[in-house]
Structure formats: C-alpha cells, structure tokens
Amino acid sequence: METPKPTIQRFTRNYILICVAVLVTLYGLFIAPTFPLRVYSIGVLVLFIPFLEIRNQSVVLQLFFVFFICIQISSIALFDRMPYELLLSSQPFGPAFIHALPAALLCCAAAHILLLKQVNIVKLYTVQFPIMLIACTWYIRMVLILNNCQHTTEAKNVQITAVVVQKCPLCCDIHELLLSFSYEGRQYQLPMDVHPKLYKKAKEGDKLNLQLHPGVYGWPWYHKDIKRRYQ
C-alpha cells in the first residue's frame, strides 16, 4: 500500500504580499531615514490591497486584519513623530475622500488589468474597492496634513490666549498641560507638552500665549511641543 506523498504548498500571491507588507512596515518604523520615506512606505501598503487574492470570508478577514494592522501601526508611529497637529475642525476628510475616490478606482482597475485571468471581478469591486477607498481616504488625509502644516511667508500667524484647564499626570519626560481656547467661534481643548519649569509653576486658570499657523491650504495648525519656547 502506497503512502500518500505530502503535498508542498506553494507560496501564493497573498503570502508574498503579506511578507512584503511586514518588511515595508518594519522599514518605515525603524529604518527609513527621512519623514517622506515613512509616508511613502504607508502608501505602498495601501497600493497592495487590490492585489490580494480573496478566496473565502475567513481569508478576507485574516488578510485585511494583517494589512490594516500594518497600516495603523505605521500611521500611529508617523503621527506620534509629527511635531504639529491640525485643529479638530480642520481635519480634511472631505478633500481626502474626493481625491481618494478616483485613486481607489484607478488602483482597482490596474489590478484588474494586470491580474486579468486571476482576479475575481465581483469581489474586486464589491469588497476590495470599498476597503481601498477607506485606506486611500486615510492615507491622502495624512498627506494633506503633512503638506498643509508648513510655514508660509505670506500668511500671518494668529496669536491666541489659552487657559490652563489642568496639569496632566507626568509620564516619562512628557510635561503636558490641558489648554482651552476659542478660535473662530469654537471652543477647543488640547494637551500640549511644555517646558518642565513652566509645568511646575503652572496653575489652573493661568494664561499662555500660543500661535496658530494658517497652513498652506488654510487649515490652522499648531505645534504639539512648545518646550523650547519656554526655557
């Protein structure tokens, strides 16, 4: 009686893309020498989504779980390293979605053309396209924020007075004050890392002078870390 020979499973397209995604994530987190390269590494992960092979529901969940974990880890690490941030009312979700719609459609069409005989057209445009649209919106929003948060010589900075709401608990070398201020009829509260001496002497109700920068696209932004300004 012949014993069945063990079958060797070949590396499918999904395995290759997952391996590349993990390597790209590690590169963006630890190796990329410049900020733009970290941004581009996230874009590479987004571009891979239409090229994944969908066989069944469990595979779909596993694949996109891994991919979105990689994208989220890279995005969170990138935003944590950014020295600036937009006001909540200035988040460019609308413009990002407008640009993401044709970008996602174009990427899915490219996968359709390149993998013509191996792609499931129905799943590509009913499952992967919506996921691609969400990922593109998230990525383009991040790129718009990076492009907007730059100093412009023509526009003038806005001086505002912020009130200390409370002193946040110390964590490592982070000395944060929860500040409150009004801008264009809206009230904002945000934590800001300040100089240790300022943190030590600050009390609830104290006032600080802050700067809001208008941004390239007109979305106000501020520095998350103002330690150097209060030495």
Image: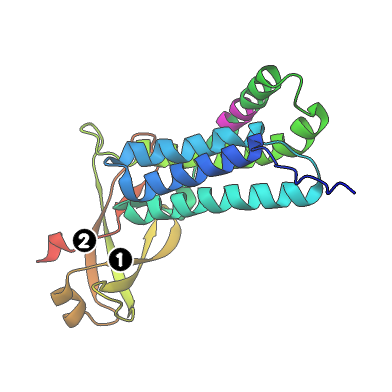
Label 1 neighbour load within 10 Å: few <14, some 14-19, many 20+: some
Q: Are marks 1 and 2 in contact (CB under 8 Å)?
A: yes
Report whether 197 appears left or right of 113.
left
Front residue (pair 159, 111)? 111
Q: Which residues are magenta?
A: 99-104
According to the image, what is the colour scheme of the structure?
rainbow
Residue at the far front: name it. Answer: 1
Distance from disc 1 to disc 2, alpha carbons, whole Å, reads: 7 Å
Report helix, strand or loop for mark 1: strand
Q: Which residue is denoted by mark 1 in the rendering?
A: 192
Front residue (pair 193, 104)? 104
Front residue (pair 44, 198)? 44
- Where is 4 relative to 129, above or below? below
Residue drawn at (56%, 54%), measured in percent from left and top? Answer: 69
Q: Which residue is denoted by mark 2 in the rendering?
A: 226
Q: Main secondary structure of the magenta part?
A: helix
**Amino acid at pointer 2:** Ile
Residue 32: percent from the left, percent from the top? 32, 42
**Residue 103 within the segment the image draws in magenta:** yes
